[in-house]
Amino acid sequence: MKITVCLVFCLFWLTASVQAQETEAGSFIASPSPAVKKTFDKKMTLVSIVLMSSMSIDTKSSFDTRQRCLGGCREMTQGVGWFIDRGPLAAYPAGLAVDSGITYVSYRMKKSSNPLLRHTWFVPPVAIAVGHLLAARDNYRLSNGAIAGYK
């Protein structure tokens, strides 16, 4: 899990756009001009890290629950069970791909000329992150026997 979180952080750290300006002397200034507003900023990075981390926690909780239930539990989320059945090498990249798509949609919303989309860019990734965390909570409650008769 630590490797996944580090990979996600490095992915967004390396892919963040860097804007440079060339001055008259030929040297480069690494900071953008005041007129240029960065779309992928600290807020976007933080929201993306929260989204990817919650996906990792959710996926890990699914594997932990399956291990504790000794085959008596199955993944209830449609489409995800197939990846969970095939193990972490299939589940984590699939989750990363889906959450990367959500981050891209969020990026496009923030970059949009529509003011409503520009001001609500954070809603999709935050909503999905909350869903991941609620699913992880239910997985751990199930594995500890708090949800009776639920398999």
Image: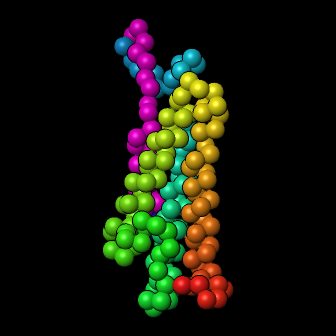
| Image point (53%, 68%), residue name | 57
| Image point (43%, 67%), residue name | 80
| Residue 101: x %, y % from top left | 44, 47
Is residue 93 shown above or below 150?
A: above
| Residue 148: x %, y % from top left | 64, 88
Q: Is residue 110 shown to the viewer in this render?
A: yes
| Image point (33%, 74%), residue name | 86
Q: Which quadrant holds the N terminus?
A: bottom left
Is residue 139 shown above or below 98?
A: below
Lateral position of residue 71 relative to residue 58, left or right: left
Quadrant housing residue 16: top left
Does residue 15 show up magenta in the picture? yes
Front residue of 32/24: it is: 32
| Image point (61%, 51%), residue name | 126
| Residue 140: x %, y % from top left | 59, 79
Residue at far top of view: 24
Front residue of 24/82: it is: 82
Q: Which quadrant holds the C terminus?
A: bottom right
Q: Is residue 3 shown to the viewer in this render?
A: no
- Segment tinted magenta in the rendering: 4-25
Front residue of 64/82: it is: 82
Picture colour scheme = rainbow
Is residue 16 shown above or below 11?
A: above
Front residue of 30/149: it is: 149
How many numbered dots are placed on residues in this image? 0
Does residue 61 show up magenta in the picture? no
